[in-house]
Image (cartoon, rainbow, N blue to C red):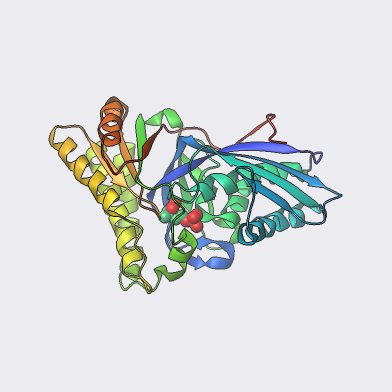
Amino acid sequence: MKIKPTKTTAVSPANIAFIKFWGKKDPKINLPYNNSISMNLSNCRTTSTVEFISSLTEDEVVINSKRVDENVSARVSVFLDIIRQWSGVKTKARVCSVNNFPSDAGIASSASAFSALALAGSRAAGLNLSLKKLSILARMGSGSACRSLVDGFGEWWKGTNFDNSYAVQLAKPSYWDLVDVVAVVSADKKKSSSTEGHGVAETSPYFTKRVANLPKRISALKKAFKSRDFDEFGRLIEEEAIDLHVMAMTSHPPIFYLTSGTFAVIEKLKELREKNIKGFFTMDAGPNVHVICRAKDAQTINRTLKKLACVKFTIVNKPCRGTRSTDKHLF
Ligand code: PMV
């Protein structure tokens, strides 16, 4: 359905994957090998304003008040081209985005960025897309972005083609009082992007085994989620995180996302567990540790981790709603 093209702003959360998207079956359309499962993060958000402007001769992309480099600009333009193709809008766009958390440090800034851009860009071009179509569009920008559209907990159905690979809601934000305390051990731009990781994933000798094993792990995780069995849920997300990093480290060339800081946090979590304060780790394509715990333990875990020399700062997140539009424009 068409609406009037107009300047539009969207706010979208990043998400943390409990079951990871790793390796692309079809890189041209970001088709994954497996389903993935995630939770939206209330305190890791991107706000993005888009306007198609007839006087522009090229797309203008500003992120966190800086004009982006050519690579980022090209990636955004390719994404905007899909919107132009779907809507028939021919003009270039001004895009302005701000993150309230460090970009490129393994806190999935591409997920919040492309989900915000999917909603803001499509509405700015006069498209009123369904949640499913928005998820498909966001997937084209960055696979994991397709999961940020839905509220709370999401599952990305891997699908088999362009139209049937998208995310659906697994549960509302209020379903489970989980908290993600992100222990940021480095806020620097990471050396290897997730795109590079996906590109070499299949070269790991363990990759085929991972893909074959995943349906079993996914159904076990869903069972633990359904019964809110936190110990089993935690065991499975740690197993999955380790799996991802084994893939990365055994790829050609190998990629090391984890650092000594990552392991110091993991050690501390083990100590806390001995005192029955339970936090379980998961890491995306970066060194920072997402500690998943119950709300009752979040404060203690946060306070304890902040005291570690390797932890620069923490970000405490609850499950939250997905991408929304707002009238608070950035320009
Ligand atoms: O969406 P991408 O292409 O940046 O890949 C995300 C990869 C991981 O964050 C490591 C896993 C995931 O499913 O979010």
Residue under the image location 35 percent in, 69 percent down: 254
Residue furthest right as drawn: 55
61 in relation to 321, above or below: below
Residue under the image location 72 percent in, 37 percent down: 8
Is residue 73 visible to the viewer in this orientation of the structure?
yes
- Give the camera-side residue of 43 and 233: 43
Tell me where residue 128 sits by quadrant.
Answer: top right
- In which of the image's four quarters is ligand 1 placed? bottom left
55 in relation to 306, above or below: below
**Does residue 131 appear to the left or right of 241 in the view shown?**
right
- Give the camera-side residue of 241 and 303: 303
Q: How many marks?
A: 0
Residue furthest front as drawn: 309
Is residue 152 visible to the viewer in this orientation of the structure?
no
**Does residue 83 appear to the left or right of 288 in the view shown?**
right
Q: Position of residue 251 (x, y in %)?
A: 36, 71
17 in relation to 207, above or below: above
Q: Position of residue 301 (x, y in %)?
A: 27, 32
Residue furthest left as drawn: 274
145 in relation to 269, above or below: below
Residue under the image location 67 percent in, 43 percent down: 96
Assign the N terminus to one quadrant of the image.
top right
Tell me where residue 6 sits by quadrant.
Answer: top right
- Give the camera-side residue of 252 and 187: 187
Assign the C terminus to one quadrant of the image.
top right
- Give the camera-side residue of 316 and 190: 190
Q: Position of residue 217 (x, y in %)?
A: 30, 53
